[in-house]
Image (cartoon, rainbow, N blue to C red):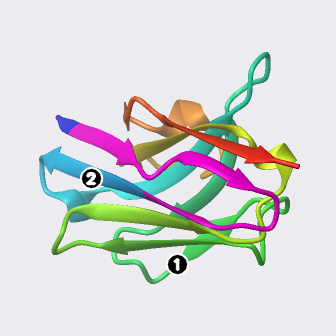
Amino acid sequence: QVQLVESGGGLVQAGGSLRLSCAASGRTFSDYSMGWFRQAPGKDREFVAHISRGAGSTFYADSVKGRFTISRDNAKNTVYLQMNSLKPEDTAVYYCGARTRISLLSDPLGYDYWGQGTQVTVSS
């Protein structure tokens, strides 16, 4: 069992930056690869970024590539999402997920545990 708690969301103007954090507790953090997803009102949960267990590999949705950076600190049991050049269309609740299964990285069904989410609102 892994517990995940996201933080760092808020209201920011277009072009601004935010850094989200996801703190994990429970089982060994480095056993899990981690992903960030987001969900806007009335829409499905959307893949944002993924990082491998040892942080050697990252993968991004085309919509955030070059603007967002995922990283992790296994000593601190935390995964981060640095978001730069934010756009109004980035507005959503952002969730982190923990994954052990061999599945499509961008498929939320492949993730075993989720945090409660943190709201990001980008004003124009």
> In this orientation, which residue lies closer to the viewer: 69 or 19?
19
Q: Is 92 a magenta residue?
A: no
Estimate the x, y position of residue 16 in percent, counting from the top left: 71, 67
Task: Report the span colored magenta.
Answer: 3-20
| Residue at screen point 73% across, 29% down | 40
> Residue 23's mark?
2
Estimate the x, y position of residue 54 in percent, counting from the top left: 34, 77
The residues tagged by marks 1 and 2 sit, at their Cα atoms, a distance apart of: 20 Å
Q: Amino acid at mark 2?
A: Ala
Q: Amino acid at mark 1?
A: Ser
> Which element carries disc 2, helix, strand or loop?
strand
82 to the left or right of 97: right
41 to the left or right of 36: right
Estimate the x, y position of residue 74 in percent, counting from the top left: 23, 72
Name the chief secondary structure element in magenta: strand
| Residue at screen point 23% across, 65% down | 30
> In this orientation, which residue lies closer to the viewer: 115 or 124?
124
> Which element carries disc 1, helix, strand or loop?
loop
> Residue 57's mark?
1
65 to the left or right of 69: right
In the image, residue 43 sits, relative to residue 104, either above or below, namely: above
